[in-house]
Image (cartoon, helix red, strand yellow):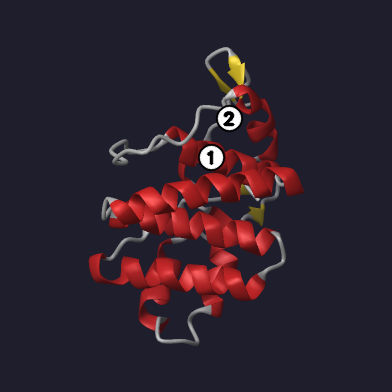
């Protein structure tokens, strides 16, 4: 999904991800990148059943706050991540319904990055919505994704940037 090795090695200060147990605060989400949203991304990248369940619990709490505070941007981000989590659990119908909500919220303001930052898994999910009323919005989002990785003569791969997962630092 995302860089799994990076996710396994990610640290918050001196604590590992699993030790970061601060509850989701019941407040307006004003950070550009909420730490709990980041934790849910990493849990999804690790991909175990327990990690996906933990990510969904965090995303549910964040979604409730985003709804209550009318934060459309966070609603879109949380719903897009939730769609990936449900897809990981093989709940495709639920995943597409949640992704449809995210795309519907993104349509009026033209939000694209929240989807593109989620990389190839999101790129693979979005075309399934193109058959519905979201064809134009999905087309605009998909046009921004980098081209798939291609083997070069040297054996290395080339790819575009996928959001915050482009760098991996071992601490």
Q: Are marks 1 and 2 in contact (CB under 8 Å)?
A: yes
The image shows residue 24 at horizontal and vertical percentages of 46, 36
Q: Secondary structure at mark 2?
A: loop
| Residue 161 in view, yes or no | no
- Give me the disc on residue 42: none
Figure check: 1 above or below 3: below
Asked if residue 109 lies left or right of residue 141, the reply is left
Front-lying residue, 58 or 46: 58
Asked if residue 11 lies left or right of residue 65, the reply is right
Q: Residues within 10 Å of mark 2 (few under 14, many from 20)?
A: some
Q: Secondary structure at mark 1?
A: helix
The image shows residue 142 at horizontal and vertical percentages of 45, 68
Residue under numbered circle 2: 168
The image shows residue 156 at horizontal and vertical percentages of 68, 44
The residue drawn where x is 31% and y is 71% is 107
The residue drawn where x is 59% and y is 67% is 124
Quadrant assignment for the C terminus = top right
Give the image quarter of residue 14.
Answer: top right
**CA distance for labels 1 and 2:** 7 Å
Give the image quarter of residue 3.
Answer: top right
Asked if residue 68 lies left or right of residue 156, the reply is left
The residue drawn where x is 41% and y is 62% is 144
- Give me the disc on residue 165: 1
| Residue 81 in view, yes or no | yes
Front-lying residue, 69 or 108: 69
Figure check: 56 above or below 94: above
The residue drawn where x is 40% and y is 53% is 64
Q: Residues within 10 Å of mark 1 (few under 14, many from 20)?
A: some
The image shows residue 151 at horizontal and vertical percentages of 69, 53
């Amino acid at each position: 999904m995302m860089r799994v090795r990076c996710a396994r090695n990610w640290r918050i200060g001196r604590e590992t991800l699993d030790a970061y147990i601060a509850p989701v605060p019941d407040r307006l989400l004003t950070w550009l990148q909420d730490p709990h949203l980041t934790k849910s991304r990493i849990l999804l990248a690790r991909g175990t059943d327990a990690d996906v369940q933990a990510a969904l619990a965090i995303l549910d709490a964040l979604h409730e706050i985003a709804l209550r505070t009318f934060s459309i941007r966070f609603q879109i981000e949380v719903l897009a991540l939730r769609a990936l989590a449900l897809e990981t659990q093989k709940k495709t119908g639920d995943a597409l319904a949640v992704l449809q909500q995210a795309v519907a919220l993104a349509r009026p303001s033209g939000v694209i990055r929240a989807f593109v930052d989620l990389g190839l898994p999101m790129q693979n999910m979005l075309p399934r919505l193109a058959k519905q009323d979201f064809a134009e919005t999905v087309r605009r989002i998909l046009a921004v994704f980098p081209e798939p990785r291609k083997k070069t003569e040297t054996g290395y791969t080339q790819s575009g940037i996928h959001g915050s997962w482009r760098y991996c630092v071992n601490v």
